[in-house]
Amino acid sequence: SLDEMMHVVRTVVGDEKFPPLAEYLQPIFIVADKDRDGKLNLTEFLLSFAEGPGVVPTEVINACVSSIRVRLTDEEIYALQERFRKIDTNGDGYIDPQELLVGLREALSSKFPEPNETTYAQILNVVMALADTDHDGRLSLSEFIRSFQEDQGVLPAVFIDTRAQNVARRFTTEEVQVLRKAFGALDRNNDGFVDYNEMYKALWEALSNNVEDKEQVRELCDLIMATADRNNDGKLSLSEFVKNFDSNAELMQVPLAAASERIEKIKQRLATMLDSADFERLSAAFRHIDQNGDGFIDGQELNASLLGLLQESFPDKSSETLNYISQLILSTADIDKDNKLSLKEFILSFATGEEGAGVIPAPLVAQYAESGTNK
């Protein structure tokens, strides 16, 4: 009813903002109440957003669905996956409009008996318009799950069965170490998180020989991030990465395999570097940069070694900006986050970098190696 709606709006926006907002919302409510019974059914409520600004502001919607948006539990994620599979009757990995219409009717008919076929079709159009983010006319699993995490929460909450099977289990110390190692391999910039780009790069490197369409890899990345990124900040913490194996062990085998392949490639690069005497050149370059001879390269030493190159590459940048760039390079290679690089971290930056790139460019390695050898 109008009174119920206004009560919720006042609670969310507060007494100070409520009077002018109530004056604005009342005529919108009257327009949305198509059958003139003084209250809005589900169809009328949804159509108010499809045909106009909606009967309540986004601030109120966000407040009502925030608990769903950021607090999907393992059980709820599992339940959504199971619900998706049931709605996807042809098993092609997508929910098309006809399948969703059947699912909506099944989920809503017992609680909202008033909609007829026409209004179900209208609800379907609203749901698809909001949830189908890539506009391909169907819902992927990641879009289905994200619809519960986004601000509008476009799919009915009845799809979440909180009584879903509890699949959580306790990992052994050995398993946690394996996952921690895999996470570290995926976290290319060593910032303690795996973001979307890092996950996508790892998946593409692992799957590119068998998958020609990058969009397929992107959809897989979307799905992994949607199920694992519980606080919806666009990146995975180690905790989120490990926890997602509770309810999505099969799905998470993909990034685990990608991480394992990346680790193997790093090992192969290290072996090649050892055989080709790159270790000696890098060690000599390290000693050259380590001016105080304490066995570490600190920010000041790295900045001094890169200053000429940075000035040449960024002639219009201030010394403060160039120093920041140098510190950023150090931070990316600084695995243990002690604000300095050991010889191991220095060498690993070349083994893990794109196309063998490391803390300093190859020409400087050769120059400093020669200087270090002649010291």
Image: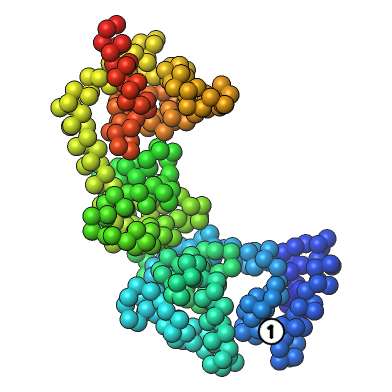
The picture quadrant where one finds residue 223 is bottom left
* Residue at (37% x, 18% y) in the render: 296
Residue lying furthest left: 275
- Closer to the camera, 227 or 71? 227
Which residue in the protein does label 1 denote? 40
Q: Does residue 113 appear in the picture of this structure?
A: no
* Residue at (17% x, 32% y) in the render: 271
Badge 1 element: loop
Residue lying furthest top: 375
Q: Does residue 191 appear in the picture of this structure?
A: yes
Disc 1 packing (10 Å; few <14; some 14–19; many ≥20): many
- Closer to the camera, 341 or 81? 341
* Residue at (40% x, 38% y) in the render: 189
The picture quadrant where one finds residue 83 is bottom left
In this view, 205 is above or below 124: above
Residue 346 in percent (x, y) is at 33, 26
**Which quadrant would the C terminus be assigned to in this image?**
top left
Residue 14 in percent (x, y) is at 78, 62
In this view, 43 is above or below 343: below
Is 174 placed left or right of 320 in the picture? left
- Closer to the camera, 38 or 299? 299
Type of amino acid under label 1: Leu
In this view, 306 is above or below 353: above
Is 246 placed left or right of 158 in the picture? left
* Residue at (31% x, 52% y) in the render: 204
The picture quadrant where one finds residue 16 is bottom right
**Which quadrant would the N terminus be assigned to in this image?**
bottom right
Q: What's the image's color scheme? A: rainbow
